[in-house]
Amino acid sequence: MVKIWRTGSCHCGDVRFAVRTPDEVEVEACNCSICARTGFVHLIVAMDDFELTAGADKLTSYRFNTGVANHTFCTKCGVKAFYTPRSNPDGVSVNANCFDTGQAPALSIVPFDGQNWEANAAKLAHKSAPPTKGETA
């Protein structure tokens, strides 16, 4: 599977990122309390497939419940373009709604029952795993 770098940002553009993905990806629309309120659509990738390209100094953090997930937001516009998820603390969850125009891969959006997170979290654990033998990054 060939991956290419794609770019995105928060609303104001101060926080910018690049993420390496294949041309088609499966993403999760979560119904947990924070995702449902913010419209976050999860594209979970390995840390090696993510780069913060601008705006590290513009980020603020919010943690709740167990405190493991690090929800990062732009201090200017308030948009959460990416964060470190509890399900994949070794990876990054990019908001698929934050890609620059023409940059998003083809998205297959699947529901994720985050309201029952403990029962369903294991279904996401593989998302940030490094490529298996034979796959190309």
Image (cartoon, rainbow, N blue to C red):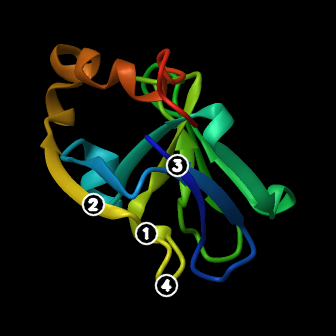
Closest to the observer, 80 or 28: 28
Residue 92 image offset from top left, x and y in percent: 55, 38
Of labels 4 and 3, earlier in sequence is 3
Q: Look at the numbered discs 4 and 3 and tell me whether their residues touch, using CB distance below 8 Å.
A: no
Whichever of labels 4 and 2 marks the residue nearer the N terminus, that label is 4
Q: Is residue 34 left or right of residue 78?
A: left
Would you say the residues marked 1 and 2 are in contact, meaning their CB atoms lie under 8 Å apart? yes
Crowd band around label 4 with a 10 angstrom C-alpha radius: few (<14), some (14–19), many (20+): few
Q: Residue at x 27, y 20 (%)?
A: 121
Q: Quadrant of residue 100?
A: bottom right
**Residue 53, image x, y percentages:** 79, 60
Circle 1 or circle 3, nearest the eye:
3
The answer to which quarter of the image holds residue 38 is: bottom left
The amino acid marked with disc number 3 is Lys
Q: Which mark is residue 107?
A: 2
Out of 38 and 93, give the one closest to the viewer: 93
Residue 20 coordinates in the image, percent (x, y): 58, 50
Q: Report the residue at 47% width, 82% height from top.
A: 102
Q: Nearer the viewer, mark 3 or mark 2?
A: 3
State the image quarter where residue 120 is shown: top left
- Taking the image as shown, residue 12 lies to the left or right of residue 66, namely right
Label 1 neighbourhood size at 10 Å, few (<14), some (14-19), many (20+)? Answer: some
Q: Earlier in the sequence, mark 3 or mark 2?
A: 3
Badge 3 crowding class, 10 Å Cα cut-off, few under 14, some 14 to 19, many 20 or more, is: some
Describe the element under mark 1 as helix, strand or loop: loop
**What amino acid is labelled 1 in the image?**
Ala
- Is the Cβ of the residue at disc 4 closer than 8 Å to that at disc 1? no
Using the image as rendered, state which of residue 114 and residue 46 is in the foreground.
Answer: 46
Image mark for residue 3 = 3
Which tag is nearer the camera, tag 4 or tag 3?
3
> What amino acid is labelled 2 in the image?
Leu
